[in-house]
Image: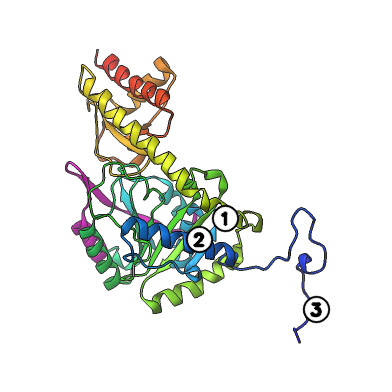
């Protein structure tokens, strides 16, 4: 006989659910199981299709957490892994969101360097020195963005092997943000997702914001993997955090299977757009008579970095674009580029608008150089 509850305050179990939202609400900290099962099946097929049949581990619905965004995932994981005053390692150049979320969680970010030598790479020696240095004892997680934004660089196979080993040896978790993974531009061979990594405690983040080009869908997820003992303890604690927030709406969760059906078409659509615009960008830069603007190799993502003459101040360039052409932009220092002379540009606009944006940059550079 089921145990009764004197204090049952769930109105949906007492015939009070509204007709527009019928059903009985069952609070599951990881998100409704049918949605997680659909997502796990989709991820298994997606990852194996991308990386060779049978090579990627099957996604386990019991190791998935549904939430509203990868931003929320970062917040939860910092709560999970860090006490106030602890730190996470974050890439530089990089998107400033991680530092902002960390501040809200009373967590510090310690930057590790991505370096450019014809292509971007992680300075593993510097990262090792940070882990072994005076700040190492308070570092709780390594953030890997695969591919990074705005550099577009994937984590290379050799880097991954070293980084997983470092994290395993030092008890540091990996937070792998892979929202741009499927948007390859000019990649090197051998890239692979960190989702499902077994060598160190790993939290892989993804969501519909990029996969479906639908930031308004507000669906993200965490996939947990690693050594069994570490995973079990991490999930026991993460369940407590997730249960306090319970962010996933049943209304949205019920649509996840249908949204997953649309994912391939949407991803292909966006991939075609960004790859086509990158080809157009190369043509425009090659035909520019001044020839002083170039694009850094972007392996994946939606954005690329333009290199402009260092004699032009980035702020001056953006302000000139606004005043003379009515177009704004993000200078390189927004992303902690190491020197002046960079401008981020999105590959998402429709081709005519994209060509106009590139033309504005080229014309503005020419006008400022006189």
* Of labels 3 and 1, the one closer to you: 1
Decide: marks 2, 1 in contact (CB < 8 A)?
A: yes
Marks 3 and 1, the one that precedes in the sequence = 3
- Residue at the spot of label 3: 6
- Residue at the spot of label 1: 256
In the rendered image, residue 360, in percent from the top left (x then y), is placed at 35, 20
In the rendered image, residue 125, in percent from the top left (x then y), is placed at 18, 58
Label 3: few (<14), some (14–19) or many (≥20) C-alpha neighbours in 10 Å:
few
- Residue at the spot of label 2: 39
* Residue 313 counted in the magenta span: no
Q: CA distance from mark 3 to mark 1?
A: 35 Å
Q: CA distance from mark 2 to mark 1?
A: 8 Å
Q: Is residue 246 left or right of residue 290?
A: right
Up-down relation of residue 152 to residue 320 (above or below): below
In which quarter of the view is residue 172 placed? bottom left
Q: Which residues are magenta?
A: 104-133
Marks 2 and 1, the one that precedes in the sequence = 2
- At mark 1, the secondary structure is helix
């Amino acid at each position: 006989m089921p145990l009764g509850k004197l204090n049952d305050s769930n109105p949906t179990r007492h015939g009070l659910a509204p007709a527009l939202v019928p059903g009985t609400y069952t609070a599951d900290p990881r998100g409704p199981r049918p949605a997680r099962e659909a997502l796990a099946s989709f991820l298994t097929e997606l990852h194996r299709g991308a990386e060779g049949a049978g090579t990627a581990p099957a996604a386990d619905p019991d190791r998935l957490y549904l939430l509203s965004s990868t931003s929320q995932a970062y917040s939860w994981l910092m709560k999970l892994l860090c006490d106030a005053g602890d730190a996470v390692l974050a890439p530089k150049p990089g998107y400033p969101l991680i530092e902002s979320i960390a501040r809200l969680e009373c967590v510090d970010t310690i930057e590790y360097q991505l370096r450019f030598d014809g292509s971007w790479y992680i300075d593993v020696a510097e990262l090792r020195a940070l882990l072994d240095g005076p700040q190492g004892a308070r570092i709780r997680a390594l953030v890997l963005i695969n591919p990074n934004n705005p550099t577009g660089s994937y984590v290379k196979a050799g880097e991954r092997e070293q980084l997983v080993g470092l994290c395993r040896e030092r008890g540091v978790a990996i937070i792998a943000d892979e929202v741009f993974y499927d948007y390859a531009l000019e990649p090197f061979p051998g890239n692979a997702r960190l989702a499902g990594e077994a060598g160190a405690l790993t939290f892989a983040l993804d969501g519909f914001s990029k996969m479906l080009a639908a930031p308004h869908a507000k669906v993200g997820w965490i996939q947990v993997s690693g050594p069994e003992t570490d995973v079990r303890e991490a999930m026991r604690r993460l369940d407590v955090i997730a249960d306090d927030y319970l962010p996933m709406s049943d209304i949205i969760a019920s649509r996840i299977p249908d949204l997953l059906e649309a994912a391939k078409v949407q991803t292909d659509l966006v991939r075609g757009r960004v790859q086509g615009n990158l080809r157009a960008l190369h043509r425009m830069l090659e035909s520019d008579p001044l020839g002083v603007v170039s694009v850094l190799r972007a392996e994946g993502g939606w954005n690329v970095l333009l290199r402009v003459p260092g004699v032009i101040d980035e702020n001056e360039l953006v302000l000139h674009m606004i005043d003379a052409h009515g177009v704004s932009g993000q200078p390189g220092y927004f992303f902690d580029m190491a020197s002046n002379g960079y401008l981020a540009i999105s590959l998402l606009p429709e081709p005519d608008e994209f060509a106009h944006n590139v033309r504005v940059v080229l014309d503005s550079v020419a006008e400022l150089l006189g």
